[in-house]
Amino acid sequence: GAVVSQHPSWVICKSGTSVKIECRSLDFQATTMFWYRQFPKQSLMLMATSNEGSKATYEQGVEKDKFLINHASLTLSTLTVTSAHPEDSSFYICSATPNNEKLFFGSGTQLSVL
Amino acid sequence: AQSVAQPEDQVNVAEGNPLTVKCTYSVSGNPYLFWYVQYPNRGLQFLLKYITGDNLVKGSYGFEAEFNKSQTSFHLKKPSALVSDSALYFCAVREGYSSASKIIFGSGTRLSIRP
């Protein structure tokens, strides 16, 4: 099946620094990728829809300047958490679909902000 | 806007017994419905989907789900539970069929199968 690679798997950073998370579709092209956030024991919350070659579409309540999304190619989308704070600590997951049907997910990135 | 509800935070079933994980949805158009499973320390995996056609959909690992339009439900079922089925299950709904159609997830149901 299709493969979505997410990197890094986990990251620990100091408060105030920025962290970049990469999401790659390894064997298919994805004009759209999705970024989700998952708090412990809670559901996936859609943060934004990443669109290749254009601006991302953010969900209500998600700060655009806080969570920068870049989708520069058909196989790569990046999420940058700027000036991270402890409340940004969470599990971030990207996903993409090669056929408009089922989503394939990256393995997720556990972010811990000290 | 579409939404999906999973009314049970946890479902406990004895091994060998049938299991049901409930899901109801709300969309303005035709629903595209999915079930995903998240095992501990692993990513989300696709189980099954309903796009169109037969209301009973069969998926991975012996799971199936029944689409009920009148009740706006898409409950996940398995005739005989295994301990290895213990995981977190998410129902999801998609409104529209373009690559940009976002998928919204339910709150998740933790399935626990006791030996």
Image: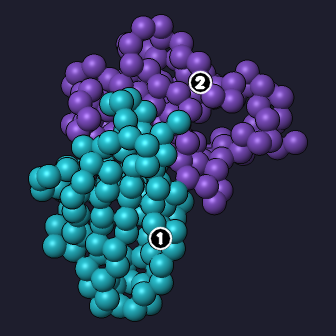
Chain colours: A cyan, B purple
What is the residue that sits farthest to the left in this orientation? A54
Residue at 23%, 21% in the rendered image: B29
| Label 2 Cα crowd, 10 Å radius (few <14 / some 14-19 / many 20+) | some
Provide residue A104's location: percent of width, then percent of height. 45, 43
Three-letter code, disc 2: Gly
Name the front one of labels 2 and 1: 1
Q: Horizontal and vertical percent for residue A100? A: 33, 30
Residue A26 appears at what percent x and percent y? 43, 49
- A2, A62: nearer the viewer: A2
Report the chain holding disc 1: A
Instruction: Mark yes or no: residue B54 visible.
Output: yes
Relative to B31, is A57 on the left or the right? left
Q: Do circles 2 and 1 both sit on a common chain?
A: no
Rendering quarter of residue B2: top left
Return the x and y of residue B103 as percentages of the image width and height.
Answer: 33, 39
Give me the disc on residue B59: 2
What's the residue type where badge 1 is placed?
A: Pro
In this view, the residue in front, A16 or A29, is A29
Q: In this view, does B43 lie to the left or right of B39?
A: left
* Point 38% across, 58% down: residue: A23
The circle drawn on residue A8 is: 1
